[in-house]
Amino acid sequence: MSHHDSSGPTAEQALSTIGGRVPVMWLGIWLAAVALGVAGFMMTVGDDPQRAWMSVWSNYLMWTSVGMAGVAFGAVLQAAKGHWGKGFRRLAEASGAFLPLSLILFFFLRRGYEHIFPWIGEVETEHLNRTWLNVDGVFMRNAILLTVLYAVFFLFMWYSIRSDAPLLAERHTGWRKAFTSFFARGWRGDEEEAARARAILGRLSPVLILAWAVVASLFSIDFGMSLTPGFVSMIWGPIYFIGGWLSMLAIIAIMANHYNSRYAELSLWGKYQFHDLGKLMFAFVVFWTYIWFAQFLVIWYGNIPREVNWFEPRALGPFKGLFWLQMILIFAIPFPLLLGRNPKMKPRWLAFVACIILAGFWVERYNMVAPSIWHGEGLPLGLPEAMISLGFLGAFGLCYAAYVTTFSKVPIRETIAVGSAGQGP
């Protein structure tokens, strides 16, 4: 990865990016979106509970994967000494602010399991491990896994934020001051704390990355793959968490473009940093499509009924259009738009492509859930799905906004191991 830009904003400049409160307009938008989502769910769950829970399930899978990937981004930079991306760390970590709400919503999902899990009744397959797939086991197992993973995430975030905490606390009042002061408890001095954070994060990062891959894979198998009883895919987990990773990169591109315009005089991120981010987005557009096609190709030429049964309801019938739409939005459009060098240096262009990718993964997560369990007439996609999806977007937006208005948009004290970015585009 390249870096032709300067060393980045000074500590004082970084501190000047602290918002202190969520802008009234955006606070109103996010709260209105959440209210719409709750209203959409309540209006639908009485008359058509399966449709309501399908939308909740697919949106939960999407935004949880984005939140996980946001924290993992910092760990990947730490493990790989990725200095090119250190300026984007806070924008990525802000996605992790959704994870506490994700854990709360996880227990809410149990109320709708009977409308989602087809294996709780009789199914036409012999290839079903009912010892593994039982309601209590699924929720207990994943509650433990998510709690442990989120605890590791919090520990990582603690030391990632801690080096900046005293400076942040000086800029805040009220609950934000108390919150940032909490991260600065027992302060041992600037240099000692920075060195300690680098050492701990360096050891913790590989553990976090491995835990993320394993837990996200098991979680997606229980709450996604199992919805087609008998279907088995060895690369289902990577398809899920790499999709979350690419969606998170898209959010970084959107938010970096927004804040680069808002703080234009600070030059928070230069064109070569956007170029590096664009290259990473392009690489994972290709990689996600590769692993998705690898799954499809083996099943297609193998023509094994227990595997074809996942593709059949998606490639045929009412979901056929959405099945191909997801590939158009995730690969066919972004691939040529990110192919050149100059487009990746333009923040607005990168944000535009990122919006297309995010829309594609919303469709992909919906396709992960709905075709497996929907047996009604037509395509179950309309006002209820739009309202519930807006509700999840609003909830994610509130969590994200609370984070980025509490912390600076870029790190103040660096915790990645000493080094510098390479030269060359």
Image: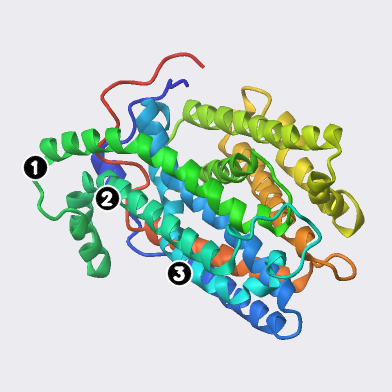
Q: Which residue is mark 1?
A: 189
Residue drawn at x 45%, y 64% as measured from the top left: 103
- Name the kind of residue labelled 3 in the image: Ile
- Label whose residue precedes the other's in the sequence (3 or 1): 3
Q: CA distance from mark 1 to mark 2?
A: 16 Å
For label 3, the residue is 104
- Residue ranking furthest to the top: 424
- First along the sequence among labels 2 and 3: 3
- Percent across and percent down for residue 218 are 54, 49
Badge 1 element: loop
* In the depicted structure, whether residue 123 falls above or below residue 145: below
Foreground mark, 1 or 2, reads: 2
Q: Position of residue 89 (x, y in %)?
A: 39, 41
Residue hosting label 2: 158
Viewer-side residue, 325 vs 109: 109
Q: Position of residue 255 (x, y in %)?
A: 50, 48
